[in-house]
Amino acid sequence: MTYRGAPNWETWAVHAWISAQEDAYFHWRERAYQTFLACETRNVDQQSADAQRKLAAELRYYFTDPSGIVGGRSAYAQDVSEQDLQIVVWEHVADNILSGINYDGIEYVCDGGRKNPKKSKDGSGRKRKLLFFF
């Protein structure tokens, strides 16, 4: 069962929390950008998949770190139980963070499972490449 476009409520809640916390939002947008750049390969589809996988792993660690040293779980645990965090689809959260960021002319746009990308133009008037994770 889906919840507001997410695979489940727990996944939606994590993304909603990140989006609502200004510091967390900008932190994860920057991490998404840096992760994408670090995954540079000749194949942009592989680069997309690598960036999504690495960002998802980083999010999972941040939110489930039992020591609370990283800070994510300790700040977020008030709203979501540890059991709930085990069923979060971290790849979906990573995809939503990656979507819409312009990476030096390549724009990630989450298509919500559809295979009909919207055409867009950057400031130079050139069409952007659209990458999809689904």
Image: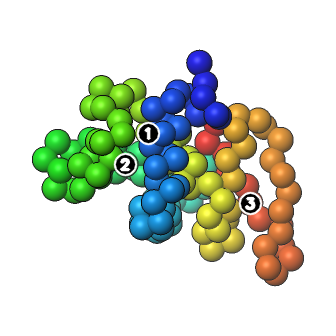
Residue drawn at the location 83% of the way across and 73% of the way down: 126
Q: Mark 1 points at which residue?
A: 90
Task: Judge whether 126 appears above or below 65 on screen.
Answer: below
Identify the image quadrant of residue 21: bottom left
Badge 2 element: helix
Q: Position of residue 33 (x, y in %)?
A: 50, 66
| Mark 1 surroundings within 10 Å by alpha-carbon count, few (fewer than 14), some (14 through 19), many (20 or more) | many
Q: Which of marks 1 and 2 is nearer the N terminus?
A: 2
* Closer-to-camera residue (114/22): 22
Marks 1/2 in contact by CB < 8 Å: the verdict is yes
Residue 50 visible in image: no
Identify which amino acid the numbered label 3 is placed on.
Lys
**Tag nearer the camera, 1 or 3:** 1
Marks 1/3 in contact by CB < 8 Å: the verdict is no
Inter-mark Cα distance, 1 to 2? 7 Å
Residue 99 visible in image: yes
Q: Mark 2 points at which residue?
A: 59
| Mark 2 surroundings within 10 Å by alpha-carbon count, few (fewer than 14), some (14 through 19), many (20 or more) | many
Label count reads 3
